Image (cartoon, helix red, strand yellow):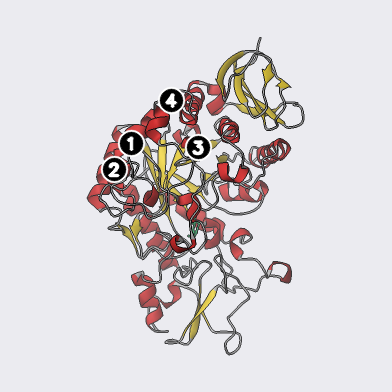
Amino acid sequence: MSWWQTAVLYQIYPRSFLDTDGDGIGDLEGIRAKLAYLRWLGVDGVWLSPIYQSPMADFGYDVSDHCAIDPTFGDLPAFDRLLDDAHAGGLRVLLDWVPNHTSDRHPWFVESRSSRESPKRDWYFWRDGRSAGEPPNNWLAAFGGRAWTWDPATGQWYLHLFLPEQPDLNWTNPDVVEAMHGVLRFWLDRGVDGFRADVVHLIGKDPALPDQPPELAEIDLVGVHDHPAAHPLLRGIRTVLDCYPGDRVMVGEVNLGSPALLAPYYGAGDELHMVFNFSLLWAPWDAGQWAARIAASEAALTPAGAWPVWVLSNHDTPRHRTRYGGGEDRARVAATVLLTLRGTPFLYAGEELGMVDAEVPDGRRVDPGGRDGCRAPIPWDGSPRHGWAGEPWLPWAPDTENAAALTADEGSILHLYRRLLAARRASPALHAGSWEALDAPAGVLAYERRAGDDVRQVWANFGTEPVECPGGAVDVATGAHRDGTLAGGEAVVLRPPG
Ligand code: NOJ
């Protein structure tokens, strides 16, 4: 198996992690300062949301120089220090790579929009309108409005599936392909272990840019665009990674609704190594729904030889503890499932503290996509600014205990995450074994993991009433597990008897 199949990866949203220079925005030195914490927790690597030079219209997902660090976060020497220290401590580092679009201030786009004759005109999608004042097609952008902006200087429209400040790159142009491969090589040469590829399914487009059919005309393209042109491009990208030693990896964000639609993005083992599966992130708090979605994912991915990826929270969605409501019990049960499924789990920084979303008052909202709540700063200690050098850019989340206090409390959710990570690492069944659903009472999710003689069962009670479950030695329990019984709102990882 490759390292990334047995790993647990941890997403850092750098702005919100830890500020060391006093501007209230997290930075690379802040991440470096917390590497020891991450090793103590027991994760294997980090994915950093974008740290590149950016005007920050979409907080870094609008890149204006792919090979420079934004000064808010630090500089290239600071990045090299972070990478060296991470590697010295056995942690891998994945960067976010944003292939579908750039910032409108990227020199490529500045040149492209300068005239119809610009050699870079065709690096982006410029089209005439279908009639005066009417954009070229009916596509909608992800943050609202049409996916086209009129450029009066050159009298054409340009395409942007996100903000107008994020024009789409034209991957049908081989020069774009070569330039974006060059970006990968720049960071691979520097020693990064891989990438999380932002909305990578969107790079494959029919150059005719046909209208969406009427039944899809009211929704933006991001969740439905699934064009075969992506696949040869992904094979080309994979070839770049494969030229490097050390199993460099790419995990793709492909926002398509069902796991069956994700499997093709693995190709024949020659496209993406992994694809985020959001089916649990989109699931309500319901054991039956979770069981069905896990089974559907296994059924779609296993025969295709596609290694699953599980995730409950990220920087785009309300945190799962907020989504489920209630107390911390559900977050504990969810963590137990997330860290015992077959595949690679991604944690979102702060979930190990049981964080909920911040309530962001109108005057402090900054994100065009309304996602500020899940980007609240991480509280590190009990001081008034929780370890941050400056007043953070977003409000603190309510009801969140700081990391130092949770570290001191062996019964905390933080220690539960640590125990689950340790149990997963120690058990071949958990980090490499098969997965099989078990019969369970209504409201309970149960499954078995097996690798040779190593067997674990996971029982997760989503309901409020106690249920019977097998006895056996307990690896990890979210509460005070009693042999043969599982209380409501509790989960257990056990070795079944005999
Ligand atoms: C997906 C990213 O996760 C999100 O934060 C971003 O706004 C869009 N892609 C556009 O890059």
Circles 2, 4 touching at the beta carbon (< 8 Å):
no
Q: CA distance from mark 1 to mark 2?
A: 9 Å
Please state if 170 lies on the left or on the right of 226 as rendered.
left
The disc labelled 2 sits on which kind of residue? Leu
**Numbered disc in front, either 2 or 4:** 4
Which numbered disc flags the more N-terminal residue, 3 or 1?
A: 1
- Most foreground residue, 147 or 18: 18
Element under disc 3: loop
The picture quadrant where one finds residue 386 is top left
Q: From this view, report whether residue 160 is shown above or below residue 264.
A: below
Alpha carbon distance from label 3 to label 4: 14 Å
Mark 2 against mark 3, which lies toward the viewer?
A: 3
Residue 461, horizontal then vertical, whole percent = 67, 29
Mark identifier at residue 354: 3
Q: Which residue is mark 4?
A: 409
Q: Residue furthest bottom?
A: 132
Q: Which mark is residue 120?
A: none
Q: Which residue is mark 2?
A: 82
Of label 1 and label 2, which has the lower sequence position?
1
Q: Position of residue 145 (x, y in %)?
A: 57, 73
Q: Nearer the viewer, mark 1 or mark 2?
A: 1
Location of mark 1 (residue) = 35
Q: Amino acid at mark 4?
A: Asp
Quadrant position of residue 109:
bottom left
Precedes in sequence: disc 3 or disc 4: 3
Q: Amino acid at mark 3?
A: Gly
Q: Residue at x 29, y 51 (%)?
A: 390
Mark 1 or mark 4, whichever is nearer to me: 4
- Type of amino acid under label 1: Leu
Of the pair 356 and 28, the residue shown nearer to us? 356
